[in-house]
Amino acid sequence: MSLDDNWISVSDRLPEELQNVLICTNQKFITLGYFASTCDWNEWRALGIGVVEVTHWQDLPVAPKEL
């Protein structure tokens, strides 16, 4: 299975709030980020960058059992 198979559109479903996930921005930039919601607004934040516009996301892969 490739990473391409796992992208979820933000219009279909959102991750749990503050859960780190892979995000793809509207500029097709892929990075680590999370979704945050308050009573006034919802936003995506890319770690180390700040607020970004996200089109798709996916869960992070599981770490290897043996290192």
Image (cartoon, grey):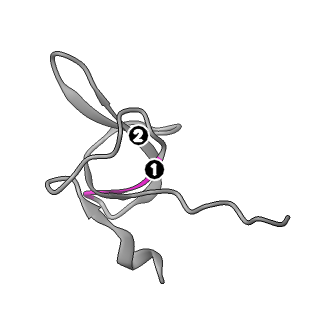
- Quick one: SS at disc 1? strand
Which of 5 and 44 lies nearest the eye of the viewer? 5
Q: Main secondary structure of the magenta part?
A: strand
Q: Determine if the magenta segment contains residue 22.
A: yes
Tell me whether circle 2 and circle 1 mark residues in contact (CB < 8 Å): yes
* Amino acid under disc 1: Val
Q: Position of residue 32 (x, y in %)?
A: 49, 49
- Quick one: SS at disc 2? strand
- Residue at x 37%, y 71% (from the top left corner): 6
Find residue 17 and report its image quarter: top left
Q: Position of residue 12 (x, y in %)?
A: 16, 57
Residue 7, numbered circle: none
Q: Can you identify the residue that label 2 sits on?
A: 34
Residue sitting farthest toward the top:
39
Q: Position of residue 49 (x, y in %)?
A: 46, 38
Residue sitting farthest toward the bottom:
1
Q: Residues within 10 Å of mark 2 (few under 14, many from 20)?
A: many
Up-down relation of residue 15 to residue 18 (above or below): below
- Residue at x 45%, y 50% (from the top left corner): 21
- Residue at x 85%, y 64% (from the top left corner): 67
Q: Can you identify the residue that label 1 sits on?
A: 21
Query: Over which residues does the magenta segment extend?
Result: 21-26
Q: Position of residue 22 (x, y in %)?
A: 45, 55
- Residue at x 47%, y 81% (from the top left corner): 2
Which of 21 and 24 lies nearest the eye of the viewer? 21
* Amino acid under disc 2: Tyr
